[in-house]
């Protein structure tokens, strides 16, 4: 079996370099990519891939990096398999000026971070399990960026490894790095017609062993509130306060169906941003459900909530503008059972016990699956994504590389 030490020596410096790029995306910007820092990382990745000796590397007009490597002798006609990861980080927590810290042989104790934050193994079983292993964490002022720069580092490290080990035969490969995954746009301006992969795998999961082939159906709704403004001293019987309308609407959302009250296969409503004044206000709302009928129920409920608010605020109006973001990828992946069968064999060959679980979110693989290329998701070894408490396990990152290398081997025999 491939030694983790050899993989980590390639993997860790690469990851530490990537997290220094400020690639926070901005969901309010329509263009792709939504932020200039993503271009910086994309250009660096394209040059790095070329530096490995890969001749077919493209950086598209919308910041997609696509690299291809032909099959080895006798494997040229095997199906092309792809690996995908995204370059942006979430805007929930700052991703600027990331200061990553490598901890060798973690002692299992609480780690103090800036601002009074701490990584506490008593509250984080995943961290407690890392005692005696090497980990990477932030200084507490930013997120780490393991979501999804760990996936990028793992994909390129696996690629570099097979290039340095010609005894590993393989079919044609495709590497895809994408912008703006965290915005939920769903691969806008993606050059689907250029993609040759018959199947693809995202490296965008969490703890070791996670294997994900289904995700939420995801919708976003922009709720607009139009009130009636007047001097508050003469407001009686006239004022319809749009700020209060928006707040009241948010308060009507079932607390038992919020992100913090659900897990597993339970969906939710999530107020993401609220702003406004007396005359107009807006609420950005995320809706998630694994079942399409459940999503239809949620969408219908939004209109009922709107009617209730209009009844409470005479003269005010509420407009609901829903938009689909991505759909559950389960059915299309189940239609191609070999994609998961090969993945499970890769886990076994890599010595990693797989745990099939639903994604409580989505990936670019969700959208790519919808577009016709089945794309399940693989763990990266990262934890506590989108937070200052984000950290990554180096042995688990190396394990993800082993799984990718085994996938490359196995698809070459298809």
Image (tube, helix red, strand yellow):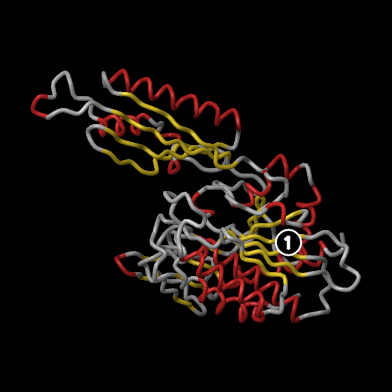
- Picture coordinates of residue 273, whole percent (x, y): 36, 43
- Picture coordinates of residue 187, whole percent (x, y): 59, 51
Residue positioned 68% across, 64% down in the render: 175
Q: Is residue 392 above or below residue 5?
A: above
Left or right: 226 as drawn, with respect to 338: left
Quadrant location, the N terminus: bottom right
> How many marks on residues?
1
Crowding at dot 1, Cα within 10 Å, few <14 / some 14-19 / many 20+, comes out as: many
Using the rendered view, name the quadrant where residue 296 is placed.
top right
Left or right: 356 as drawn, with respect to 406: left
Residue at which label 1 appears: 347
User: Is residue 131 or residue 116 the one in the foreground?
Assistant: 116
Which type of secondary structure does the marked residue at label 1 adopt?
helix
Q: Residue furthest right?
A: 74
- Picture coordinates of residue 394, whole percent (x, y): 57, 72
Residue positioned 48% across, 39% down in the render: 220
User: Is residue 135 or residue 337 the one in the foreground?
Assistant: 337
Using the rendered view, name the quadrant where residue 350 is placed.
bottom right
Q: Is residue 408 above or below residue 315?
A: below
Q: Is residue 242 above or below residue 214?
A: above
Q: Residue furthest front?
A: 61
Residue positioned 48% across, 58% down in the render: 385
Residue positioned 51% across, 36% down in the render: 323
Q: Residue furthest left?
A: 233
Quadrant location, the C terminus: bottom right
- Picture coordinates of residue 376, whole percent (x, y): 68, 52
């Amino acid at each position: 079996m491939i030694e983790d030490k050899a993989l980590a020596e390639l993997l860790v410096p690469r990851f530490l370099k990537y997290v220094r790029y400020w690639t926070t995306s901005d969901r309010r910007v329509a263009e792709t990519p939504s932020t200039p820092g993503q271009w910086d990382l994309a250009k660096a990745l394209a040059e790095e891939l070329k530096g490995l000796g890969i001749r077919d590397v493209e950086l598209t007009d919308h910041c997609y990096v696509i690299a291809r490597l032909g099959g080895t002798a006798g494997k040229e006609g095997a199906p092309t398999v792809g690996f995908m990861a995204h370059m942006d980080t979430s805007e929930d927590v700052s991703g600027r000026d990331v200061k990553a810290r490598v901890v060798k042989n973690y002692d299992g104790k609480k780690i103090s971070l800036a601002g009074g934050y701490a990584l506490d193994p008593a509250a984080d079983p995943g961290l407690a399990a890392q005692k005696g292993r090497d980990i990477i964490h932030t200084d507490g002022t930013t997120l780490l960026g393991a979501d999804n720069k760990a996936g990028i580092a793992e994909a390129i490290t696996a690629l570099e490894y097979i290039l340095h080990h010609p005894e590993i035969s393989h079919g044609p490969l495709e590497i895809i790095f994408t912008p703006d995954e965290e915005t939920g746009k769903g691969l806008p301006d993606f050059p689907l017609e250029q993609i040759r992969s018959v199947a693809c795998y995202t490296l965008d999961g969490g703890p070791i062993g996670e294997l994900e082939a289904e995700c939420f159906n995801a919708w976003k709704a922009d709720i607009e509130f139009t009130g009636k403004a007047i001097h508050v001293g003469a407001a009686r019987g006239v004022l319809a306060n749009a700020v209060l309308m928006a707040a009241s609407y948010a308060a009507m959302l079932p607390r038992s169906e919020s992100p913090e009250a659900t897990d597993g296969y339970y969906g939710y409503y999530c107020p993401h941003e609220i702003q406004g004044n007396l005359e107009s206000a807006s609420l950005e709302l995320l809706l998630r459900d694994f079942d399409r009928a459940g999503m239809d129920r949620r969408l219908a409920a939004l209109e009922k909530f709107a009617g209730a608010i209009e009844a409470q605020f005479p003269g005010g109006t509420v407009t609901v503008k829903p938009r689909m973001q991505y759909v559950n990828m389960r059915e299309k992946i189940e239609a191609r059972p070999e994609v998961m069968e090969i993945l499970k064999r890769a886990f076994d060959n890599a010595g990693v016990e797989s745990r099939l679980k639903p994604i409580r979110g989505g990936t670019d693989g969700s959208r790519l699956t919808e577009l016709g290329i089945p794309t399940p998701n693989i763990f990266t070894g990262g934890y506590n994504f989108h937070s200052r408490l984000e950290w990554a396990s180096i042995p688990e990152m190396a394990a993800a590389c082993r799984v990718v290398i085994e996938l490359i081997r196995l698809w070459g025999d298809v």
